[in-house]
Image: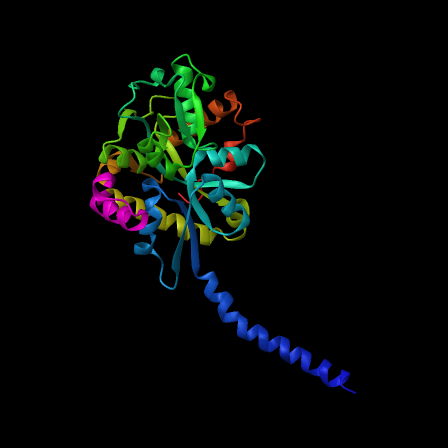
Amino acid sequence: MLARPFKLALPVLVAALSIAFAPQVHAQDKVLKVGTLKLIHGISAYFYEKFVPAGYTVEVIPFESPTDGKNAVLTGTVDTCIHGIAAFLLGAAAGEPVLIVANANNRGMAVMAGVNTDIKTIKDLKGKKVAIWPGSTQEAVILERLRMEGMSIKDIQPIRLQFSDHAAALARGDVDAYVGAEPAAGISLANGTGRLVEYPYSTPIGPLNMILSASEKAVKDNPARVKLIVDMHRQAVDYAMAHPGEIVEMAMQKLGQQKKSVELAVPNVELAWKLDDVFMERANAYTRLMFENKQIRQVPDLNRHITKQFM
């Protein structure tokens, strides 16, 4: 007896639920989710809110690992993410549907040694404990710097360590040196525990470091949404670079670092957005080096994985 009334009521219930959830789904569509790394050269994401289109909000999701950021793009956890180009190339070479939609920054890297060590050059790293974050841009860079000095990774003791732990590990003496990311170098210089060995920009890669990525699905299914973010990114980068004092303040607020260390780190960071000929030259050089170093098994087609449609 209850079957017929239930059948009649079911469409009404479904319709009511659809109406109830529709505003929530619509509201979620208006939240632009952007990922970035917990580094000064990923700070531009926090300036997006100054340029967010009317009716939208921005949610910034910070990641510790470049690979985690790239994976979040692929799973749709974020719409875009600022992370190292090495993580992108590792994914692209493995056939993952990840794209570069804008540059994100140059520089931001440093080879640091403990003040009580005798390390003053790359060659002095021989036999020393050197903190490196696997899968990072810094890993590819130090492999090339070692090669340029007639050395290889076998000549040092690589210690797997995430970027945020580099400065503290050096201060404790757990490692002799690190190939790190700002603000680590600024912290080590500010507290007097570290010595700058070099800013490693003499390779064919130059200072190229991080990019803004999106998934192929996002670019294909909702290019207008990706363009909104790229436009915000461009404006945020230009604004931040014109106001270095605000970069310092934002980094102190979002990264929890002291002013002195941030002020020492900021000059070693160049936020960027253009996918120009210089970027392409460096990206291709990066790809070749990762292939030669056997970090990737095949060379990905950058013409497929880098899109300039939002420039």
Q: How is the image coloured?
A: rainbow
Look at 48% across and 27% down and name the residue there: 287
Residue located 39% across and 37% down the image? 163
Residue at image coords 35%, 62% = 54
The image position of residue 9, as x and y in percent, is 68, 82
Residue sitting nearer the eye, 188 or 95? 188
- Does 76 appear in magenta? no
Magenta highlight range:
242-262
Does the image show residue 51? Answer: yes
Q: Percent position (x, y) of residue 184? A: 32, 36
Q: Quadrant of the C terminus?
A: top left
Q: Where is the N terminus found, in terms of image quarters?
A: bottom right
Q: Residue furthest right?
A: 1
**Magenta stretch: residue 258 in it?**
yes
Q: Nearer the viewer, residue 193 or 279?
A: 193
Q: Answer left or right for 1 relative to 111.
A: right
Query: In the rendered image, which quarter is residue 6 located in?
Result: bottom right
Q: Residue 270 lies in what quarter of the image?
A: top left
Q: How many marks?
A: 0
Residue 78: image location, x then y, percent: 47, 51
Q: Residue furthest top?
A: 150
> Percent x, y for residue 269?
29, 36
* Residue 106 in view (yes/no): no
- The chief SS type of the magenta part is helix
Is 269 left or right of 204, judged from the image as shown?
left
User: Looking at the image, which is closer to me, 7 or 174?
Assistant: 174
Rendered position, 142 above or below 35: above
